[in-house]
Amino acid sequence: MAPGLSGPLGAAIGAAAGFGIGIGEKLAGVESPQAEAHRLIKNIYGMDIPTNSGTVKQVVQISRSRSSAGLFRWPCGRPASGNW
């Protein structure tokens, strides 16, 4: 391989692998925690917060800390009663 081509080639291989994984997740119906939080926040509150924002990451982190299963469908849309 010619010098200087390994970096771009590696980037292309990584991008292709990531794309393939993303397509596989969509076909299987799997959703990342950030994507699920983004979707639920948008559906429930009508707010379009970017998926990779700090706010979405905080929602995921809080929900994981309050649930042994790591699921966070329940924190969105419930009153903050403390009875999780």
Image (spheres, helix red, strand yellow):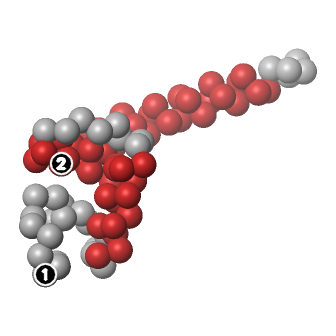
Q: Amino acid at mark 2?
A: Leu
Q: Position of residue 23 (x, y in %)?
A: 36, 34
| 3 or 65, nearer to the observer | 65
Question: In the picture provided, is 17 more to the left or to the right than 84?
Answer: right
Residue 29, by quadrant, is top left
Q: Disc 2 designates what residue? A: 40
- Mark toward the start of the polypeptide (2 vs 1): 2
Q: Is residue 40 visible?
A: yes
Observer-nearest of 15 and 51: 51
Report the residue marked by disc 1.
83
Q: How many marks?
A: 2
Contact, mark 2 vs mark 1 (Cβ under 8 Å): no
Q: Quadrant of residue 33?
A: bottom left
- The vertical placement of 2 against 11, above or below, is above
| Point 16% across, 58% down: residue | 76
Alpha carbon separation for disc pair 2 and 1 = 20 Å
Residue 20 versus residue 34: which sits nearer the camera?
Answer: 34
In the rendered view, does 2 fall on the left or right side of 73?
A: right
Element on which disc 1 rests: loop
Residue at image x 38%, y 64%? 61
Residue 81 to residue 6: above or below: below
In the displayed structure, does residue 7 sit left or right of residue 12?
right
Q: Which amino acid does the dot numbered 1 rest on?
A: Asn
Label 1 Cα crowd, 10 Å radius (few <14 / some 14-19 / many 20+): few
The nearer-to-camera label among 2 and 1 is: 1
Residue visible at 39% across and 37% down in the picture: 22
The residue shown at (40%, 43%) is 53
Of the 4 image quadrants, the one containing the C terminus is bottom left
Query: Residue 17 at what x, y percent from top left?
Result: 53, 35
Is residue 24 in view?
A: no
